[in-house]
Image (cartoon, rainbow, N blue to C red):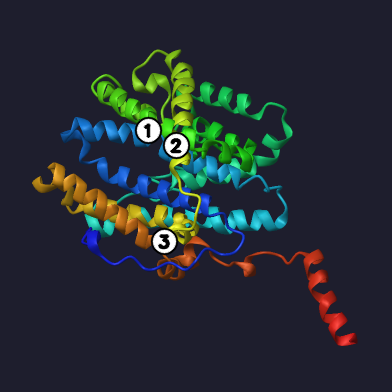
């Protein structure tokens, strides 16, 4: 599957004017961590060190991605244009990929799998969550204390096993504080964590996090980092749920700040790839699952330290290619489809478009 550890990386075009290189860099690096961590799942049982790295990465890679998503959702106001983009850029890809993954499994693995839009599978939960979070953005901008309210909802979700698996609402609610935090942040907050002093402090913080994770591997259930179950479903007393929510939110927030501190702010070779992270996110799952279905991860070599490193580099290279311009052009029809035919034309915009033509004719 991953023959491309040394495959050439397409040279990306420079970022479009008006884009902030820091955020594109952050999105690209976060999506690489997401993909690499997914490749560690079938291998981590053989190495306590890899399990510790897995726990640390899982503590902040999705929170970082969600914070940035919230930051760029601040302008969502429920207007027709915003709703159209939400439908075409989030809802439609969800329907496409939630249908494609079961069909892919049946084709590659030979095992039939039900297609259901109510129970997100594998990584499509993020699209459901983003759709719900963004729809509720006007509410979070309206209330007086949005972040404390989001934390309370996350804590209540962690003690409510009756929520069930529909639309992966546990994850939607338990990851909600990170999205709301992104809505509350301003550009100067990101500049604060990018100071030299914070970059230096991030080194011992990550070192301590890895050391603690190494100690915690045999003592802690990794499922807490997935935020998809209530405390009772993890065989813990109900009161542990709210405590873990607050503890994990604090740890994830600290590590996310350290991650942002290390993200370069200048334009680099991978900066333009930050605009294609949704492609990398949605498509890399096919590579990971194909390798899993075909028994690639079961080969003894990949359970050695060299094999784990090889898988990590190969997946990082693969997701880089998946974020590139040529791949985006091929899959834009399903990830960012233009669906003007499906929507009524806004009469105000139509009038604005006709006005310049009238002026041109009269001139």
Question: Residue 57 lies in what quarter of the image?
Answer: top left
> Please, what secondary structure does the residue beneath circle 3 have?
loop
Residue 193 spot, x, y in % from top left: 52, 36
Q: Is residue 233 above or below residue 310?
A: above
Residue 113 spot, x, y in % from top left: 32, 49
Of badges 2 and 3, the one in the foreground is 2
Whether residue 39 sits left or right of residue 243 in the image: it is left
The residue that mark 1 highlights is 203
The N terminus - image quarter: bottom left
Residue 269: mark in rendering: 3
Q: Is residue 167 above or below residue 236?
A: below
Asked if one can make out residue 105 in the rendered structure from this viewpoint, the answer is no
What is the C-alpha distance between the residues marked 3 and 1?
Answer: 24 Å
Residue 199: mark in rendering: 2
Q: Is residue 193 above or below residue 112?
A: above
In the displayed orientation, state which residue is furthest to the front: 196
């Amino acid at each position: 599957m991953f023959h491309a550890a040394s495959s050439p990386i397409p040279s990306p075009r420079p970022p479009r004017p008006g884009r902030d290189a820091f955020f594109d860099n952050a999105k690209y690096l976060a999506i690489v961590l997401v993909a690499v961590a997914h490749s560690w799942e079938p291998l981590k049982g053989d190495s306590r060190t890899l399990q510790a790295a897995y726990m640390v990465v899982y503590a902040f890679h999705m929170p970082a991605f969600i914070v940035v998503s919230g930051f760029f959702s601040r302008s969502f106001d429920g207007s027709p244009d915003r709703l159209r983009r939400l439908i075409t850029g989030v809802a439609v890809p969800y329907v496409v990929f939630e249908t494609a993954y079961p069909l892919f499994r049946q084709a590659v693995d030979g095992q039939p799998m039900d297609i259901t839009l109510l129970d997100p599978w594998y990584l499509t939960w993020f699209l459901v969550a983003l759709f719900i979070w963004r729809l509720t953005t006007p509410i979070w901008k309206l209330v007086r204390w949005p972040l404390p309210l989001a934390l309370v909802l996350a804590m209540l979700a962690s003690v409510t096993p009756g929520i069930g698996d529909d639309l992966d609402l546990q994850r939607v609610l338990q990851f909600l504080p990170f999205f709301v935090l992104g809505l509350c942040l301003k550009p100067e907050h990101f500049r604060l964590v990018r100071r030299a002093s914070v970059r230096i402090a991030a080194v011992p913080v990550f070192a301590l996090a890895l050391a603690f994770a190494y100690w915690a591997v045999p003592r802690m259930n990794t499922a807490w980092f997935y935020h998809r179950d209530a405390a009772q479903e993890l065989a813990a007393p109900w009161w542990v749920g709210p405590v873990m929510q607050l503890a994990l939110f604090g740890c994830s927030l600290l590590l996310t700040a350290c991650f942002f501190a290390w993200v370069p702010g200048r334009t680099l070779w991978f900066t333009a790839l930050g605009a294609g992270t949704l492609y990398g996110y949605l498509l890399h799952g096919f590579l990971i699952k194909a390798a899993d279905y075909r028994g690639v991860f079961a080969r003894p070599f990949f359970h050695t330290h060299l094999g784990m490193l090889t898988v990590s580099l190969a997946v990082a290279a693969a997701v880089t290619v998946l974020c590139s311009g040529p791949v985006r052009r091929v899959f834009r029809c399903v990830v960012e489809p233009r669906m003007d035919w499906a929507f009524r034309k806004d009469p105000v915009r139509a009038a604005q478009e006709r006005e310049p033509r009238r002026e041109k004719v009269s001139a």
